[in-house]
Image (cartoon, grey):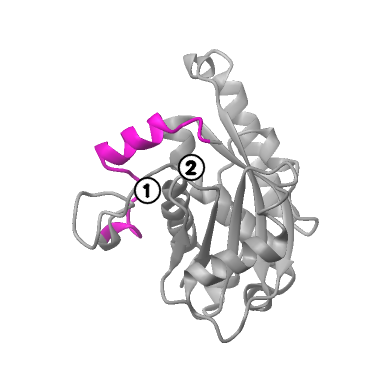
Amino acid sequence: MIEEDLKIKPVRIENSKDLENLPANYPEDIKKIITGNISAKNVNLQSSIAQATTTNTVNVWIIADEEYRSTFGSNWQTKAYNTIEGADDAFNNDHSINFVVGKYSTWDSTDSEDNCSVLLREAQSESGWNSNHQGMDMLAIFTDQSMDKRGRSERLGDAWIMKHQITADWDWHVGQHEASHNYGCPDNGYTGPVCIMTYANMMITANWCVDCDQTIETNRNHF
């Protein structure tokens, strides 16, 4: 484990709703930074035409398995929360979509299973997601056990799974990629346009290609 990976760093939040379900042990110094940033942003937006665009709020249920919780210990909720907040920055900037964490829970993944599709379905079943969303819109599943892919998502669905990557920065890239599938974006393969849906550059860009941008905008009200 890289020591840098365990550090908690400030993230950008979009509005005060993002603060309603901060983990109880979220570091106070980091909380002050992000709270100050959102206060300044609200002041700057008061006279901005950006307020004319209605923001779509997507309520996110975070669920993490025993491997993910073991990796980050008591900070697992904070690390997952920060991943969601990093993953929604481009959604908010380009499409006025805001992911708001509303619930945390745990699950026990099958240690011998590395098929991401199977683990996705397992987490959905164990959490009860398939029968009761409990007021949430999107299920974000976190694991740190071996998987055959970095993540898996339901295209135009409402759930996705990801394995913790090398750094927190890589984690939110994977989160944005998987959440984009929920809005209908396809994978572009290993080579293709500069787009987070293209494997070759998904870790170095937060941008979508023209086609994916249009797909997200078309499905902006999916949730």
Residue at which label 1 appears: 206
178 in the magenta segment: no
Q: Using residue 131 as the reference point, say whether residue 146 is left or right of it.
A: left
Hey, what amino acid is under mark 2? Answer: Asp
Query: Sequence-wise, which precedes: disc 1 or disc 2?
Result: 2
Q: Which residues are magenta?
A: 201-222
Q: Nearer the viewer, residue 59 or 205?
A: 59
Q: Amino acid at mark 1?
A: Ala
Secondary element type, mark 2: helix
Residue positioned 28% across, 49% down in the render = 195
- Residue 136 disc label: none
In this view, the residue farthest toward the bottom is 112
Query: Which residue bears the numbered disc 2?
Result: 89
Task: Determine whether the residue tagged by mark 1 lies in a helix, strand or loop.
Answer: loop
Residue in the picture at 75% in, 70% down: 74
Residue 124 can be seen, yes or no: yes
Q: To which quarter of the image does residue 208 belong?
A: top left
